[in-house]
């Protein structure tokens, strides 16, 4: 296993990492760069806990290999979603008191933020469908729904 | 003054804390700067620290796993201290039960253990008293400063007031004049605030840790990185307890980044300098597995054996006995008998198990970073593993990415301790993969429950017996009892099976399967008698006023008697788990696929005094969702001793598209002592769904989970 250097564009900053080819982007983010807001839950893209944005699209970091992500793509993690944790989705999350244990919430928030980027006025069923890939064991789904609906209102008011 | 407790602070200052745990006096320290630093922190008591700017730090002694202890316990303290909540910052307390424990299970003992929904219940009086004592220190200090009698002083939010002279001083300003009284009053209930004067308890207070949980900065143990840290993983058998023989150790040690192979009785551990290297090595391990007790065990074929055990003439271990059920059977006008079953379920907390342990070079001390539900050993098994004193281990509690009972056991902490011992003094982060977490899980036991009910000529229940067959003692027996139903003759027994499959408390423990069986059985009687299920329970709750109030309230808010659209039905179930709650659900069934859909859920709850009403509602919502998930979908199966599931692809949880439209909770007002709420909703769900299904289809669901295949089989029977 030979190490290689990769240059990744994360949250608007270029990061160089020396890792083995094929290393999961999730381990690079968390263990090499300390961007631990993105969580490990399953490693097989079943739980959505590691959801990040690549060029604006919500994807699961656990199944992305670092080699394929060093081609200039814009990678965004929860740490880069907003300057002060005040993205409309994050604000709505606080108002709705959505998290319990909180472990899945970065993934939920990144998925929800991507939804409102592509569809600023989703129906309840569209929200459910879009959010279906992100698991929450504490059972906060109804508050997540409420938060997204609140963020949607907020976004449409300000836009 | 009684026994003294030595406490090391993070600043390296030696504090002696008296037996009451409340009067710290700086006694000695080799580091004079440390003493200065400590002095500037201005401890008022072991529970709280105040700085000149009025900032207040309150220590939370309980684990925070989403249930809100990081807010609720400090809030109770702040209420009695009369603190300005906007100035309060919360930190975890040190893991020292003598100081920070709540009353344990034996009289006179103390315990730090976030299990059994005991946190608010067991700490309510502790935190009130400690908060009142902190307020007393501040009053005493102001009295000395102003040279007035303490009895003339009162407090408002974070200030001491002397009305006579119209003087006020903020808690922060008082820091300069802090004076410790010789003794502190041992506040009894009468010295505490009148609940009608509460300004914090019972109001809508946002949870303290939510902002950091939405910007990604909240730290779970799995997120920590220490200097020189290395990574550990273990390969454990799908046959629990099987002994491994590693056949390619040299190849593994030759792999890039691999530092050490550490054998365990039941696993092979690998330590490497990166997580990915450790995981690559784990995949490459060639292990021959020996046999274990579970070999030959097939979980889905065990039920006929259990049924035979339930029929055997020898009784099992008595769990509860009231009156004489045999007499009830002899004099019965009618008897009912049914078997209920439940398969294994897995905790599935979103953060896989993990820990970081650092053992000193000489092996004589250690430090642990972990998300744990704590335990009778607050140092989580590390002193025993290393053969060192309790105080030589420091535990840094982190947020838990879910607990649900799984993190109330120390297996993963001790595993990490063993790796760290081998790597001392380098810290080791042990990570369980999701596959490890599922396959080597500790499950809620599989059981069979034989229920028998007798009625007299008027249809009144006269006898109720409940025989639980399964592995795990209280894990299967909890909740098998009917204290709130006026049934004169009752008998509960446990008949023991043992299979070598790892088991553990799972949110609400035996209450899940047992309340399902009890509540479903009651509806089978109601159905047979043509009696309304609420009416049947109303009659049974004749002596249980508080339980009855939850029944009446939920009937009201769910509009129980209102006509429903075609294809819908409602079902009801009552649960006691500290707090008392009755739940109603509304369901429909897709008769082609066998899929049950829960459309709405209502709960009426009596939890005594409620600290954070919105958080209690969140616990009801989460409890119902976890209940629906486990009741409709979740199933661990074992074939020839091997756990068959590996990850979320074959252990399915409820997802967003499957949630009900609404979960509505009404909290009944009460001045009684607070009761736990974390495990009251989950065990309502199975009974409520089965009872709705019976009213909708006339058919009985008696085996958890109600998978589409099972539902179709029942519909077609």
Image (cartoon, rainbow, N blue to C red):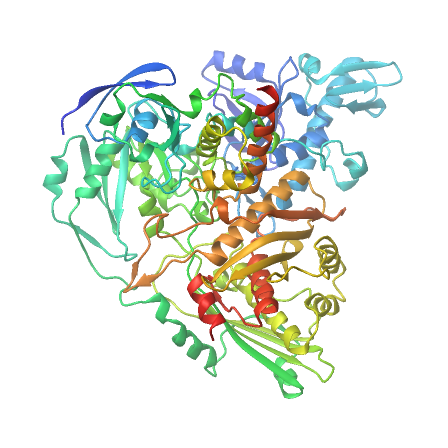
Q: Quadrant of the N terminus of chain A?
A: top left
Report if residue B587 is visible in the image: yes
**Relative to the observer, which residue lies in front, B198 or B171?**
B198
Which residue lies at the image location 49% right of the left edge and 35% below the top edge?
A102
B269 over B680 or under it: above or below: above
Q: Quadrant of residue B194?
A: top right
In the rendered structure, the answer to whether residue B218 lies left or right of residue A53 reads: right
Query: How many labels sit on residues?
Result: 0
**Relative to the observer, which residue lies in front, A94 or B377?**
A94
> Whole-percent x and y of residue B188?
75, 40
Q: Quadrant of residue A35?
A: top left
> Whole-percent x and y of residue B614?
65, 39
B260 over B291 or under it: above or below: above
In the rendered structure, the answer to whether residue B571 lies left or right of residue B640 reads: right
In the picture as drawn, the residue positioned furthest to the right comes out as B164
Which residue lies at the image location 46% right of the left edge and 25% below the top edge?
B217
Which residue lies at the image location 54% right of the left edge and 64% below the top edge?
B514
**Relative to the observer, which residue lies in front, B515 or B591?**
B591
In the rendered structure, the answer to whether residue A98 lies left or right of residue B393 reads: right
Report if residue B65 is visible in the image: no
In the rendered structure, the answer to whether residue B31 lies left or right of residue A146 reads: left
Q: Quadrant of the C terminus of chain A?
A: top right
> Whole-percent x and y of residue B609?
72, 44
> Whole-percent x and y of residue A157?
62, 22
């Amino acid at each position: 296993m030979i190490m290689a250097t990769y240059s990744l564009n994360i949250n608007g900053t270029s990061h160089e990492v020396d890792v083995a080819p094929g290393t999961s982007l999730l381990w690079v983010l968390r263990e090499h760069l300390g961007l631990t807001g993105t969580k490990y839950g399953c490693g097989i893209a079943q739980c959505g806990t590691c959801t990040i944005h690549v060029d604006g699209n919500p994807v699961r970091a656990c199944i992305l290999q670092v080699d394929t992500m060093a081609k200039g793509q814009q990678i965004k993690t929860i740490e880069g979603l907003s300057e002060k944790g005040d993205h409309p989705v994050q604000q709505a999350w606080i108002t709705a008191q959505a998290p319990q244990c909180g472990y899945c919430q970065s993934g939920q928030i990144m998925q929800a933020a991507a939804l409102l980027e592509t569809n600023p006025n989703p129906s309840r069923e569209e929200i459910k469908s879009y959010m279906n890939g992100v698991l929450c064991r504490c059972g906060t789904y109804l508050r997540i729904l409420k938060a997204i609906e609140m963020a949607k209102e907020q976004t449409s008011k300000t836009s | 003054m009684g026994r003294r407790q030595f406490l090391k602070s993070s600043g390296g200052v030696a504090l002696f804390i008296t037996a009451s745990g409340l009067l710290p006096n700086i006694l000695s320290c080799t580091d004079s700067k440390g003493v200065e630093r400590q002095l500037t922190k201005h401890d008022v008591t072991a529970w709280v620290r105040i700085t000149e700017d009025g900032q207040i730090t309150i220590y939370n002694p309980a684990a925070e796993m989403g249930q809100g202890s990081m807010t609720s316990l400090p809030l109770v303290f702040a209420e009695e201290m009369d603190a300005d909540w906007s100035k309060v910052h919360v930190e975890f307390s040190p893991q020292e039960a003598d100081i920070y424990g709540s009353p344990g299970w034996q009289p006179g003992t103390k315990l730090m253990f976030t299990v059994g929904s005991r946190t608010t219940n067991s700490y309510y009086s502790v935190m009130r008293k400690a908060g009142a004592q902190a307020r007393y220190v501040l009053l005493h200090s102001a009295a000395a400063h102003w040279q007035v009698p303490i009895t003339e002083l009162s407090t408002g939010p974070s200030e001491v007031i002397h009305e006579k002279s119209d003087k006020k001083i903020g808690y922060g300003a008082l820091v300069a004049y802090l004076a410790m009284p010789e003794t502190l009053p041992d506040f009894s209930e009468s010295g505490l605030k009148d609940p009608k004067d509460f300004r914090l308890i019972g109001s809508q207070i946002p949870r303290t840790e939510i902002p950091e949980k939405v910007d990604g900065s909240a730290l779970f143990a799995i997120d920590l990185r220490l200097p020189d840290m290395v990574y550990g993983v273990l390969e454990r058998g799908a046959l629990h307890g099987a002994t491994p023989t590693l056949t390619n150790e040299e190849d593994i040690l030759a792999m890039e980044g691999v530092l050490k192979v550490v054998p365990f009785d039941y696993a092979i551990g690998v330590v490497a300098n990166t997580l990915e290297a450790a995981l690559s090595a784990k995949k490459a391990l060639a292990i021959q597995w020996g046999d274990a007790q579970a070999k030959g065990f097939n979980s889905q074929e065990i039920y006929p054996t259990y049924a035979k055990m339930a029929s055997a003439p020898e009784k099992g271990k008595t769990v509860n006995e009231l009156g004489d059920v045999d007499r009830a059977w002899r004099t019965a006008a009618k008897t009912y008998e049914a078997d209920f079953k439940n398969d294994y379920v897995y905790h599935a907390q979103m953060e896989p198990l993990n820990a970081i342990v650092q053992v000193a070079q000489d092996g004589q001390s250690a430090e642990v970073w972990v998300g744990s539900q704590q335990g009778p050993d607050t140092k989580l098994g590390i002193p025993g593993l290393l053969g060192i004193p309790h105080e030589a281990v420091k535990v840094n509690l982190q947020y838990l990415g879910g607990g649900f009972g799984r993190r109330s056991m120390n297996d993963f902490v001790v595993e990490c301790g063993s790796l760290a011992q081998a790597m001392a003094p380098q810290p080791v982060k042990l990570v369980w993969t999701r596959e490890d977490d599922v396959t080597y899980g500790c499950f809620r036991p599989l059981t069979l429950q034989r229920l028998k009910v007798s009625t007299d000529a008027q249809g009144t229940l006269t006898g109720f017996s409940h025989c639980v067959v399964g592995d795990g003692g209280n894990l299967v027996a909890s909740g098998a009892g009917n204290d709130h139903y006026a049934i004169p003759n009752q008998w509960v027994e446990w008949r023991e099976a043992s299979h070598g499959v790892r088991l553990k408390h799972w949110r609400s423990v035996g209450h899940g399967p047992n309340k399902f069986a009890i509540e479903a059985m009651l509806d089978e009687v109601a159905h047979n008698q043509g009696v309304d299920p609420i009416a049947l329970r109303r009659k049974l709750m004749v002596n249980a006023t508080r339980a009855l109030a939850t029944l009446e309230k939920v009937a009201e808010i769910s509009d129980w008697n209102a006509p429903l659209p075609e294809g819908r039905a409602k079902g009801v179930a009552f649960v006691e788990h500290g707090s008392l709650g009755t739940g109603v659900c509304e369901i429909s069934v897709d008769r082609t696929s066998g899929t049950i859909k829960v459309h709405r859920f209502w709960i009426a709850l009596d939890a005594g005094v409620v600290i954070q009403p919105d958080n209690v509602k969140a616990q009801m919502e989460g409890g119902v969702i976890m209940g629906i998930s486990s009741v409709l979908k979740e199933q661990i199966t074992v074939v020839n001793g091997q756990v068959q599931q590996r990850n979320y692809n074959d252990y399915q949880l409820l997802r967003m598209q499957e949630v009900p439209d609404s979960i509505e909770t009404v909290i009944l007002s009460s001045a009684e002592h607070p009761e736990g709420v974390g495990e009251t909703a989950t065990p309502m769900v199975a009974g409520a769904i089965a009872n709705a299904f019976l009213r909708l289809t006339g058919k009985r669901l008696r085996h958890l989970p109600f998978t589409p295949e099972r539902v179709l089989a029942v519909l077609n029977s």
